[in-house]
Amino acid sequence: MKFMKLGSKPDTFYTAEAVRSVSSEVSSDLVIQVQGHRYLLHKFPLLSKCLRLQKLCAESPESSPRQIIQLPDFPGGIESFELCAKFCYGITITLSAYNIIATRCAAEYLQMTEEAEKGNLIYKLEVFLNSCILQGWKDAIVTLQSTKAFPSWSEDLGITSRCIEAIAARVLTHPSKINLSRTYSRRGGGGGGGGRDDIVSCNGGGGGGSECARQKNLSKGWWAEDVAELGIDLYWRTMIAVKSGGRVPSHLIGEALQIYASKWLPTKQVIPDIDSDKTGEKTSKYRLLLESIVSLLPCEKGAVSCSFLLKLLKAANLLKASPSSKMELARRVGIQMDEANVKDLLIPSLVSETRYDVDIFMAILEQFLSQGQSPPTSPPRTKGRYERRRRSRSAENIDIDFQERRRSSSASHSSKLKVAKIVDKYLQDIARDTNLPLSKMVAIAEAIPSFARIEHDDLYKAIDIYLKAHPELTKSERKRLCRVLDCKKLSVEACMHAAQNELLPLRVVVQVLFFEQARAAMAGGKVTDLPPDIKALLAAQDDDSSRPPAALSTTTTIPGTEDQWSVSGLKSPKSKLSTLKMKLAEDDLEENGIAKGLKFKNLCSIPTRPKRMFSKLLSINNNRSVAEKN
């Protein structure tokens, strides 16, 4: 911390009967009133350096031995006035980053310019500010913070902009060339701070370690925590200046924003205060802070983590931020949705009847799916030997571009596989909500491309949870919900559970049993063609699974133990067959013996005794195996 001393005389100011005076052999002839305080002073030293006092004395009549001057709205109060008065008397004063702004504004108010006297206070303050204060890191930060008390004065004098430019210049400069202060740094050598770089003092004593280690520690986002001390207005302007420099990597900008958000945005402990904020003052303050942070987010993908973006989105929902801010956050989350955590995606809903904000999740998912491109199959090739011999540099560049696109497409493909798992887990959580409409459940499930779901166990579990939480669903609604399920992609454990699931539509149970029987036959080496009726059913399932994903548009929590399913305690195959027979009979009763379509007719043409049907399948397999051996 730098400081400057002016004057050489001892302090002779004293207080008597609530009046401040200065010891002198000459009686006072001037009374100055500042914010209700009286000062008994002398015209000679004051008027020679203060043009404003000269004008006021010339305008006011002398009605008594002591002329009275009023100084309303004096910037900085009595402390700043007394510093200026002491400077006029030649009394020693000490200036630093903590009081230079108040003193500079007071000197401007009194018009202590070079016109009044050479080497006046304003000149000395400007030299100290430009040559010392703004050249140091801590001093520039403290000075900028002090401008909050005098916003209009600091703006008019250009002090705020100069401080911001000085701080941005320090950030863009290599840390080894900056005058840092150990006392101002909060990252000293404990290794904390979530893996952030620690600052080592440049003033010695406590740095410890070699010069090489010091340079390493000072190489990255060393400035983020110090700048985070600023209020949102000054912070926003400072970060804009840093970003406009174009030399700070986007991920360091993102780290700085995350530090600032964690320091100032409301936490779970502050949420009750926001709820009790009747005037809305706190909420408005936090909303402005959040929207300012969103406007500062770097545009590059991965500059900030998906988890941080989702925390901002939750805060935006809580603070009722502008729709543009919420959609911007949803767009950014969608770009890197494959990094998301299901827990972070469960954003509480404050408007709709559902427990979670499903609409904003659908917007995120839609943004993610909109950026996917089908991978190219092969690069453009030249034809003929002659063209290959004269292969140009541009042709080589085309191959390089193709390889880059292929790697990008491969990454996009793998990210879709990750997002498919995330979506299915998300569906399991929201399926417990009794107020969740079927249309939204189906829209989210069908949005994922079929190739992205390698297995359907998680999807089946989500469907099972939803059916348990919504027992009022009609038969057609249950069919609509299960339409996206591909029984061929269910594990043996899931198949065994689905075969006994009374909540599933009959079609799904039959398909599960068919695929389970076919898989058992193939596992035993008895591969054969299935009867026409069964093949028709399998073809119908293939048609459903190859259907393109639908657009994301739509027109009592169940205890966790009921959502779990396993193969333990399952019924025997004989019981499964009786269950199927019961479902077939029930379906015949509901449809009054009238088949709704060809596929249903084929299904009903299967013998009513399922046990005989599976015996027939095994018999066909055995006969064909014997024929092949002969």
Image (cartoon, helix red, strand yellow):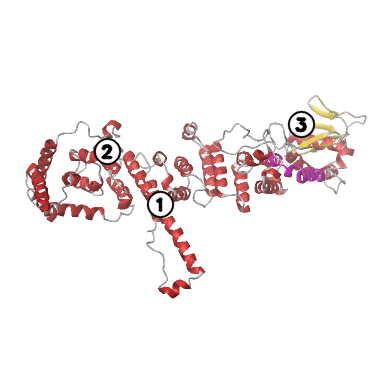
Residue at x 11%, y 39% (from the top left corner): 577
Residue 218, picture quadrant: top right
Task: Look at the numbered disc 1 and give the secondary structure of its residue.
Answer: helix
**Residue 346: image x %, image y %?**
39, 40
**Residue 625: image x %, image y %?**
12, 49
Residue under circle 1?
Answer: 368
Q: How crowded is mark 3: few (under 14 residues within 10 Å), some or many (20 or more)?
A: few
| Circle on res. 465 | 2
N-term mark: 1 or 3: 3
| Circle on res. 42 | none
The magenta-colored residue range is 122-142
Based on the picture, tell me whether residue 230 belongs to the magenta stretch: no
Say if residue 174 shows up in the picture.
yes
Residue closer to the observer: 195 or 518: 518
Amino acid type, label 1: Phe
Residue closer to the observer: 166 or 61: 166
Amino acid type, label 2: Ile
Foreground mark, 3 or 2?
Answer: 2
- Image marks 1 and 2: residues in contact by CB distance under 8 Å: no
